[in-house]
Image (cartoon, helix red, strand yellow):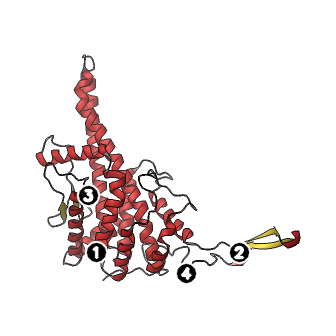
Amino acid sequence: MQASYVPGMKNPWFPRHTYHGIPIGRNVKPAAECTLLHCVGPAATVERAVAVPILTPEHLWRSFQAEAEDILKVNGSFEGNDRERNRRINAAYAKLWLADNRFQWAGLAAFASKQVGCGLLHSAEVSEKNRRVRELVGRAFAAYPGAGASTMVQSGTEAAAQYMYRKLGFGNAHLFLDIYPLHRFFMERGWEEFNAYLAKRQNDKYPVHWAVDRNTLRFGTPFAEIKEGFDLINSGDLKRSVDRLAQHEQVNILQRIMYNDPVLQRLLALNQYAWATGFPTGDYEEIKLTLSAECRAKSGFTSWFSQHKNAELWMVKQRMPFVLAAANQFHQLLHGPERPYVEASIRTIAAGGGVA
């Protein structure tokens, strides 16, 4: 049975929205509950007036942006705790799909973000392993000249793993800040208002958490792929909607805030070579997407990036075929006998599980 979200109706994933049923341009609370003010009227007379807050597109966008930011805050902070933040992002994407199966991109994103969590786990383990080795060797040879040189490999690998960890967390969080509120606006207000007011999201009327340089990517840019993707959702063409939103996700957002980084490119190249050749052993991460709650999945539920030693994940032309192949595999599984397994995995992710 296909899940369909109906604004205002009770569901297990989202509470009734604060502004449900209030049209744009109308007061958000009864005049009797509003603040009574004194003001200067004609001929300098003192008169009374009521300050009535009016619902605007900007108010709406802010409500959904605040919802996304609240999901990302761990103990009230946006800093640190990247793995806990990742679990929350995974769960939020999963809940979007469980609430409304039209959000097929979000269902796929639950798995893709979970895979980022696998990368975070791997980076943390590599960093910790090399730290232990570095400290052990350092203590053992502390009395010998040049002892520091003996741990240069471990120090370099540790630093690289930490850098990868930070970039993965940064990209994961900022993609979420961009795209989760888009889904929430669409599901609560519908296509007509989404289409009419998308440009109103980018404004200076409310503060947002957006730690990306404005020259790299301005917050809330209304890229064409956004409207195209949600228009296709509205018309029921879910497979093509995933392709358009994947283009937005990979090119408009992640390419700009992650993959254009030359340091990250170098680290990805080293990881690719190690994965393809097996040297050095133990510190590389396989580039794949498992359509399960776990980092490893049974046969038939994994898409792989090219394992050629010179493949470049940061290049759009090489990365997009991998992303679209995963999207197609997800589509096929949802329309085949394995759908219950996929849905069970998404429910596990929604409950905060996965990444194991």
**Residue under label 4:** 21
Residue 239 vertical position relative to residue 153 in the rendered view, above or below = below
Q: Earlier in the sequence, mark 4 or mark 2?
A: 4
Q: Are marks 3 and 1 in contact (CB under 8 Å)?
A: no
Q: Are marks 4 and 3 in contact (CB under 8 Å)?
A: no
**Spatial CA span between label 2 and label 3:** 54 Å
Q: Which mark is residue 240?
A: 1
Foreground pick, 266 / 165: 266
Q: Residues within 10 Å of mark 1 (few under 14, many from 20)?
A: some
User: Residue at the spot x=27%, y=68% of the render?
Assistant: 345
**Residue under label 2:** 33
Q: Is residue 320 visible in this depiction of the protein?
A: yes
**Residue under label 3:** 316
Q: Earlier in the sequence, mark 4 or mark 3?
A: 4
Determine whether the residue tagged by mark 1 lies in a helix, strand or loop. Answer: helix
Q: Position of residue 338 (x, y in %)?
A: 20, 74
**Spatial CA span between label 4 and label 3:** 42 Å
User: Residue at the spot x=41%, y=56% of the render?
Assistant: 174
Relative side of 108 to 307, left or right: right
Mark closer to the observer (2, 3):
3
Q: Position of residue 251 (x, y in %)?
A: 32, 60
> Amino acid type of disc 3?
Val
